[in-house]
Amino acid sequence: MSFKKSSSAFKLAKQVLAGGVNSPARAFKAVGGSPVFIQKSQGAKIYDIDDNHFIDYVCSWGAILLGHSHEKVIDEVKKTLSLGSSFGTPTLLETEMAKLVIKCFPFLEKVRMVNSGTEATFSAIRLARGYTGKNKILKFKGCYHGHGDSFLIAAGSGAATLSQPDSAGVTNNVAQDTLLAEFNDFNEVERIFAEHKQDLAAVIIEPVAGNMGLIPAEPVFLKNLREITRENKTLLVFDEVMTGFRLSISGASGIYGIEPDLICLGKVIGGGFPVGAFGGKGAIMNALAPDGPVYQAGTLSGNPIAMRAGITVLRELLERKEAYLELEEKGAHLTKGLLSLAKQFSLPVVLNRMGSMFTLFFNSNAEVTNFKLAKESDTKRFAFFFNQMLHLGSYFPPSQFEAAFLNLSHSYEELDETLNHAETTLQKMV
Ligand code: PLP
């Protein structure tokens, strides 16, 4: 496989784009080499400018769930686009979208649409602070909540990959309002509450973390978080930007049966367009401007094209009752195959999966349940795995600390092709 055109394209991009990319994880820094420039996509495949194609397990970092270039999404977007691209006024589509989101997450009463996951999380935290009148937040090591200043502290994936867990440019004053605990460690949470409960506005968590590799929270851990936050009038915020509509129609909260005070959504909700949302009970959401004192706004928020794409995806998911079972079965098929190959070649790995999200950790621990254990993975081995798989035609996330994703259009033939690629690759790693 030749990547000549992609390599030259990256050299040119670096002259005019910071780092050659518009989001750091795309730059392949953690795995070496030059990123692949993609020009089109269809179903489970992406096609690069050198005429290579790949079975895609990044799926636009989880945003693509029905499949790339899904016919219904493209058709509906084209129709909506013919009426105009943005009006800066209310549209019927926004209400329709909000109703669909509320139908999927029954504890929601009101939502606000934004343009990205980052906007959803930092707006939710501002709202939590405004509503509770408290300042501090608690986040978990390895969880990523977008690039808002308050979250760039032990922020997983991108930051971990670049070995700079804290970003320059975040002031000490901001950082001191973010408290940190180990994921899945309730003793640490209790210690922090004992000291700071008067001033804790929110606990924010990825209930199934995807940004330190895939690590689900233990159910009892989430249950305990729900109780301690309720007891202390601290808001529990689920960041379901990755997991919302992906793990189930009602996300991770539906699977765990736990209702947060606020939920943040992104990725799948936009069907490949820039959309995010956050929501909660009316009493909390009414604190937002224009009705309340917490300011939040967006020129393109609720943009008709993005709303139409999101509505089409959500309707399709609501109609296809078997969609999540299908994703579960495909996920199980692929990961069982990967695990048995690793066993066959006696390679120490831990495979974490939930539905259509998974991570193959090159890690000798018995399990990977937090960021500390995830970081003990052999990232050089991962880089080898990634590059070999890429050259054979399977596109995995370019970091050990990113979750891989399936979409509904992956066929069993494609999954088996990837297993063949993995057999060749893992054999070379013995
Ligand atoms: N929250 C989580 C859990 C994410 O995985 C991400 C992005 O990967 C974000 C927030 C930020 O979303 P965006 O990249 O759309 O700003």
Image (cartoon, rainbow, N blue to C red):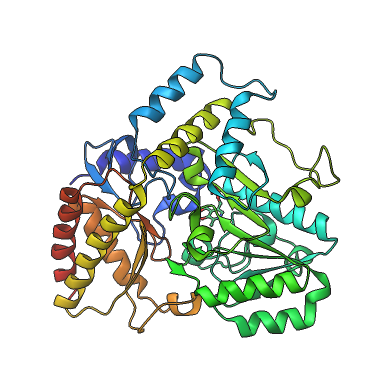
User: What residue is drawn where x is 75% and y is 67%?
Assistant: 234
User: Residue 171: x, y in percent?
Assistant: 75, 62
Up the image or down, 424 lies above or below 323; here it is: below
Up the image or down, 101 lies above or below 358; here it is: above
| Camera-side residue of 247 and 380 | 247
User: What residue is drawn where x is 38% and y is 80%?
Assistant: 367
| Camera-side residue of 63 and 291 | 291
Indicate left or right for 172 with 146 as reference: right
User: Residue 50: x, y in percent?
Assistant: 24, 37
| Camera-side residue of 37 and 58 | 58
User: Residue 167: x, y in percent?
Assistant: 62, 62
| Camera-side residue of 273 and 279 | 279
Residue 271 seen in the current view:
no
User: What residue is drawn where x is 40% and y is 60%?
Assistant: 403
Indicate left or right for 397 with 134 as reference: left
Up the image or down, 65 lies above or below 362; here it is: above
User: What residue is drawn where x is 33% and y is 48%?
Assistant: 322
Furthest-top residue in this view:
83
User: Residue 381: x, y in percent?
Assistant: 29, 71
- Residue 197 sits in which quadrant? bottom right
Up the image or down, 364 lies above or below 342; here it is: below
- Residue 386 sits in which quadrant? bottom left
